Image (tube, rainbow, N blue to C red):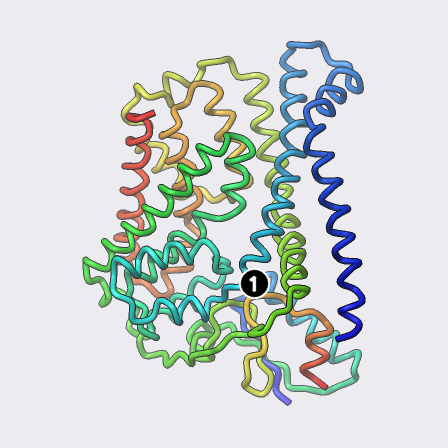
C-alpha cells in the first residue's frame, strides 16, 4: 500500500503526516508513506487544496487535516 | 448510522445551551467591562489607563464572541463548496460574468494561501481563464469572514458592507483587466504542461452532522489560530485609544493630506498581518482623526497584497505578471481610498 501526503511544507501538512504515521503505528501496519511537496506533482495529482492524502493513487481527502478515524477507515 | 441518530438530540441541546450562553454574555459585555475597569481594577474614571483598559475588556471578548459565531456559521456554509466544484463552475466561462462569479465564489470556497499555487495550476490548466482565476485569487483572502466580523464588531455594519462590496469590485475589475491584457505568456511555461487530473475532491456526501462538525472544526482551526492576533491588535488599539490625543492623526492621515492614501498603500503592501490584527488598529486610528478611505486602503493593501503571497505566486508567475498583478490591485485600492475620502 502506498500512502501519499501532498503539501508544500506548511504546518498543517506536517500535522497530516503525523496523524497518518500514528494510525499506522496503532494498527501496526506497514505502508510506503510518501511526501510530495513539488507543486507540479501536487497539481498533476488533481490536488487543489493542501494538505491532501492519497491511498494507492486515489485522492481521499483535500484541504484539511484528516481525523484518525478517517485514516483508520481508509486503511481497513 | 444508529449511533449518529442517537447523538443528534444531544448535539441540538448542546447547541441551544451554547447559543443561550452566547447571547447572555454578549448582552452583558458593557456592564462587565465597567465592573472590571472601575471595581476590580479600581481605576480613576476618565483617566488614560481606565479608557485603555475599559476599551480592551469590552472589545476583546466582544470580537472573540462574534468570531466564534460567524466562523462556525461560515464553516457550515463552506462545507457546501469545494475548490473542485468551484473550478467546475468557472471552467470555460466567458470573462465578465466569469469574473463576477469567481469573486463571489472566492468568498465562500475554502482557501488557504499555502495552496494558492496548486489551485492556480488546477484552475488555468482546466479551462478557467487567467483573469477569472485572478478574480478568485484576489477575493479569497481579502473578503473573508474574519475581516468582515472584525469590521462589523468594531466599526459597524456600514463599514463592513463597504469593505465587502469594494473588495469584491476590486477583485472583479482587477481580474477582468488582467484578462484583457492577455498576459497568459507571462505564466511560467511549465504550468500549462501540467496535465492536472480533474480530481473530484473528497467529502462528496455530507450529512448535517458532518457539516456541524465542519463548523466546529473551523472554529477550532481559525479562532484557535487568530485569537492571539485579535488580542494583540486590540491591545495596540487600546493603547492608541487611551493615550494618543484626539485629532492627533488628522494632519497626517486625515482627508486633507492627498499623499496619505498612496503612502498607506505603499506601506501596506509589504506588511503582512491577518485581518484580526489590523482591524483593531484601524479602528483606533479612525478614532484619532484618520480618514476612513486612507485607513481602509491601508487595511486592504495589508490583507490583499503581501510579500509572502507574492513570493509564493512567483513560482508560477513571471515578474511581468507579478508586477501587473500588484500594480492593478494596488491601483484599485488607491481609487477606493480616494473615493471614500471624497464621498464620506
B251 versus B151 height, above or below: above
Q: Is residue B217 above or below residue B245?
A: below
Q: Which residue sits at x=68%, y=24%?
A: B30
Dot 1 surroundings within 10 Å: few (below 14), some, or many (20 or more)?
A: many
Residue B23 at x, y percent in the picture: 70, 37
In this picture, residue B156 sits left or right of residue B184 = right
Q: Chain of mark 1?
A: B
Tell whether B32 sits left or right of B72: right
The number of numbered discs placed on residues in the rendered structure image is 1
- Between residue B164 and residue B319, name the one nearer to us: B164
Q: Which one is in front, B228 or B45?
A: B45
Q: Residue at x 59, y 46 (%)?
A: B70
Seen in the picture, residue B109 relative to A43 is either above or below; the reply is above
Where residue B93 sits in the image (x, y, percent)? 29, 67
Q: Position of residue A66 (x, y in %)?
A: 65, 70
For label 1, the SS is loop
Residue at far bottom of view: A1
Residue indicated by mark 1? B79
At x 52%, y 47%, the residue is B145
User: In which quadrant will I find the N terminus of chain B?
Assistant: bottom right
Instruction: Identify the image quadrant of the C terminus of chain B.
Output: top left
| Residue B331, quarter of the rendered image | top left
**Image coords of residue A62 (percent x, y):** 55, 71
Q: Quadrant of residue B92?
A: bottom left
Residue situated in front as seen by the camera: A54 or B30: B30
Amino acid at each position: 500500500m502506498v500512502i501519499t501526503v501532498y503539501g508544500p511544507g506548511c504546518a498543517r501538512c506536517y500535522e497530516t503526516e503525523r496523524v497518518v504515521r500514528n494510525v499506522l503505528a496503532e494498527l501496526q501496519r506497514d505502508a510506503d508513506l510518501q511526501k510530495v511537496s513539488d507543486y507540479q506533482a501536487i497539481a498533476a495529482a488533481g490536488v487543489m487544496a493542501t494538505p491532501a492524502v492519497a491511498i494507492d493513487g486515489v485522492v481521499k481527502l483535500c484541504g484539511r487535516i484528516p481525523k484518525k478515524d478517517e485514516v483508520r477507515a481508509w486503511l481497513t | 448510522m444508529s449511533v449518529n441518530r442517537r447523538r443528534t438530540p444531544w448535539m441540538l441541546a448542546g447547541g441551544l445551551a451554547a447559543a443561550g450562553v452566547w447571547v447572555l454574555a454578549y448582552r452583558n459585555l458593557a456592564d462587565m467591562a465597567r465592573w472590571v475597569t472601575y471595581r476590580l481594577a479600581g481605576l480613576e474614571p476618565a483617566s488614560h489607563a481606565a479608557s485603555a483598559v475599559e476599551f480592551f475588556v469590552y472589545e476583546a471578548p466582544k470580537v472573540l464572541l462574534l468570531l466564534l459565531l460567524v466562523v462556525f456559521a461560515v464553516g457550515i456554509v463552506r462545507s457546501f463548496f469545494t475548490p473542485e466544484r468551484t473550478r467546475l463552475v468557472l471552467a470555460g466561462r466567458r470573462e465578465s460574468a466569469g469574473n463576477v462569479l469567481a469573486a463571489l465564489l472566492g468568498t465562500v470556497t475554502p482557501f488557504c494561501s499555502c495552496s494558492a499555487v496548486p489551485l492556480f495550476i488546477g484552475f488555468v490548466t482546466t479551462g478557467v481563464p487567467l483573469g477569472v482565476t485572478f478574480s478568485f485569487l484576489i477575493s479569497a483572502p481579502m473578503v473573508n469572514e474574519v475581516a468582515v466580523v472584525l469590521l462589523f464588531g468594531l466599526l459597524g455594519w456600514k463599514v463592513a458592507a463597504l469593505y465587502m462590496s469594494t473588495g469584491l469590485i476590486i477583485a472583479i475589475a482587477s481580474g477582468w483587466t488582467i484578462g484583457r491584457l492577455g498576459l497568459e505568456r507571462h505564466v511560467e511555461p511549465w504550468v500549462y504542461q501540467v496535465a492536472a487530473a480533474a480530481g473530484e475532491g473528497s467529502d462528496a456526501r455530507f450529512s448535517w452532522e458532518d457539516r456541524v462538525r465542519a463548523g466546529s472544526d473551523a472554529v477550532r482551526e481559525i479562532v484557535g489560530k487568530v485569537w492571539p492576533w485579535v488580542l494583540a491588535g486590540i491591545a495596540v488599539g487600546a493603547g492608541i485609544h487611551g493615550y494618543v490625543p484626539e485629532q492627533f492623526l488628522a494632519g497626517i492621515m486625515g482627508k486633507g493630506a492627498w499623499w496619505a492614501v498612496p503612502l498607506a498603500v505603499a506601506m501596506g503592501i509589504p506588511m503582512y498581518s491577518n485581518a484580526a490584527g489590523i482591524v483593531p488598529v484601524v479602528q483606533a486610528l479612525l478614532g484619532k482623526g484618520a480618514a476612513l478611505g486612507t485607513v481602509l486602503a491601508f487595511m486592504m493593501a495589508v490583507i490583499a497584497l503581501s510579500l509572502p503571497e507574492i513570493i509564493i505566486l512567483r513560482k508560477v508567475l513571471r515578474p511581468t505578471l507579478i508586477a501587473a498583478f500588484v500594480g492593478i490591485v494596488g491601483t484599485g485600492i488607491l481609487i477606493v481610498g480616494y473615493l471614500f475620502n471624497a464621498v464620506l
